[in-house]
Amino acid sequence: MGAQDDAITVEQAAAAFAAEVAYWREVRGLPKRELAARMGFDPSYVSHVESGRHKPTEDFARRVEETLNPGKAIWKRWLDYEAAKVRTSRTTTPLAPRKAEQPYATGAAIIVEHDAARLDYDGRCYRLTMRRLLRNTGSEPITRYLIRISVDRYPGEPERSNAHYREYPLTWDELALAATCRGEAMHWQAKHDRDAFKEVWLLFENDQGRFPLYPGESVWIEYEYSVGDEKWGRWFQRAVRLPTGHLEVELAFPAELDPVVWGTETSMSAEAAPLRTAPIRREEGAIRVFSWTTSTPAVHARYRLEWRFRASPEHGTTQGKFR
């Protein structure tokens, strides 16, 4: 998703739609078969759409939007797909193919050389710190970078979850979002602001000036925000949307809670399976840290870490995530 989605090809738009469906299905905790049943489709149909074997239809888009209730995110992808089809039908010159990693502007292409996330929990609140090494492989400066924040306390129960966030929505004040680049504070601009879902442009600028990411340059950006555990619970998902060289995750919990961690990975063509390597545990005084890494993850892959606090069973019902 980016500044000039109106320039994407039909194939790119269909792939983006499929990825959006897969993402929200995972957020809601629904297997493909169960989602298909809720929508009134053949059990294999959702799998075919997510894998690209079937192109989306308006009926499918409406039903999956209604069933998963992602705040119009899936419907927006459907409109992008329809617009791409209309553009293609109006021209006799085939659209020049472009790489999928060009979502920001014509002539721009961005890759993530290193993606590092650390989630700290203090017993009441989660604080996420993201560090990304971005590289501009295109021919035009990049002036902003899109991030997404979303939570879901009751996966598999969208009505209950939506009711919860209508009563207790995420707010910008509680998130306390802050971002930096090259030691400079980054301004940010909300793109979508919903009860449990935010999309934000991090801008390569502040009151003192602009510092675009120029072609051939690499730069580290860092951003962080907080979510209370009544809204963010015990799972943390990383979705790969841009070509990425190295991905790492750290989870830091109070050792007195006796935390245990496990994880799954999902691709566009496969159901969730256990992580191929186990998270590594280490002790840092009163904090227990779990770390997990992978190299060259596939675009649209999703890696999900879950945990349980064995010394605190009363906290066993909350769920949350970020990507």
Image (cartoon, grey):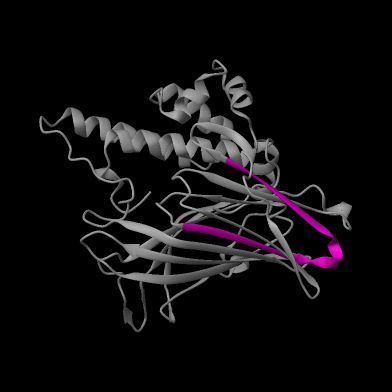
Name the residue located 52 percent from the left edge and 36 percent from the top edge: 22
Q: In front here: 160 or 91? A: 91
Q: In front here: 132 or 24? A: 132
**Magenta-highlighted residues:** 246-265
Name the residue located 31 percent from the left edge and 31 percent from the top edge: 82
Q: Position of residue 246 (x, y in %)?
A: 48, 58
Residue 168 falls in image quadrant = bottom right
Q: In front here: 28 or 107? A: 107
Name the residue located 64 percent from the left edge and 32 percent from the top edge: 30
Residue 288 falls in image quadrant = bottom right
Left or right relative to 32: residue 268: left
- The stretch drawn in magenta includes residue 197: no
- The stretch drawn in magenta includes residue 263: yes
The answer to whether residue 232 shows anywhere in this view is yes
Left or right relative to 58: residue 261: right
Left or right relative to 10: residue 91: left
- In the picture as drawn, the residue positioned furthest to the left comes out as 92
Name the residue located 35 percent from the left edge and 84 percent from the top edge: 208
Q: Position of residue 166 (x, y in %)?
A: 64, 48
Count of labels shown? 0
